[in-house]
Amino acid sequence: MRASGALTDAFGARWVWGGAAAAYLVAGLFALPIFYASRTNSLWVAVALVSLGTAAHQACSANILTVMSDVFPRRAVASVVGMAGFAGAVSGAMIAGVVGQVLQRTGSYVPIFAMFSGAYVLAWLILRVGIPRIERIDV
C-alpha cells in the first residue's frame, strides 16, 4: 500500500493530529462510494466500487496500526495490536449475523452497503474524539 504510506508522509509534516490519522480519513472517504455498488445495473461498475472499498479498507487497516505505534510505547504496541485484532475478529463474526438478518428481512444489499460505506468515516470520528492529540502515552 505504497500510496497510503506516501499519504502518511505527506500529511505527517503538515497536520498536527498525525499523518497516519489524516491518511486514515482520506482512505475512509474512498470507501464512501461503495454504497452505489448496490444501486448500479453494471456488473463492472459494482466490481470497481467494491474493489475501491477493499483498497480503502486495507489503507485504513494499515494506518490504524500506524496510529497505534504512534500512540503507544514500543513495548506495548504488540499487545495493543493483538487486542485490536481480536476485537476486529469478534466484531466481524458478529456482523456476519447482522448482515444475514438484514438480507433475510429486506432482501436487499442497499442497507448493508449504506452501513459499511460510512463506517470508516464514523470510525475516524470516534478515533478523533477518543484520541484528541496524537502523542505517545505512558503505559
Image: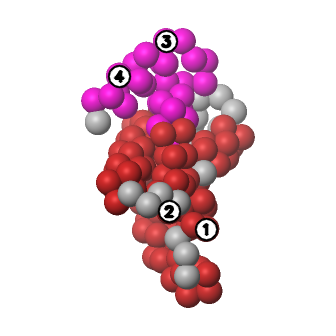
**Residue type marked 3:** Ala
Which portion, as a residue range, is magenta? 2-28
Residue of label 1: 111
Height in image: 138 above or below 83?
Answer: above
Residue type for callout 1: Pro
- Kindly identify which residue carries mark 2: 38
Residue 84 place in picture, x, y as percent: 47, 57
| 103 w.r.t. 10: above or below | below
Q: Position of residue 25 (x, y in %)?
A: 55, 35
Task: Describe residue 77's horizontal placement relative to residue 14 as left or right.
Answer: left
Comparing labels 4 and 1, the label whose residue is closer to the camera: 1
What's under tag 4, amino acid-wise?
Ala
User: How busy is the neighbourhood of tag 4: few (under 14 within 10 Å), some, or many (20 plus)?
Assistant: few
Q: Earlier in the sequence, mark 4 or mark 2?
A: 4
Is residue 25 shown in magenta? yes
Extreme residue in the bottom direction: 104
Q: Secondary structure at mark 1?
A: helix
Instruction: Describe the element under mark 4 as helix, strand or loop.
Output: helix
Distance, label 4 to label 1, CA atoms, is 33 Å
Q: Which mark is residue 13?
A: 3
The residues bearing labels 3 and 1 have C-alpha atoms spaced at a distance of 38 Å
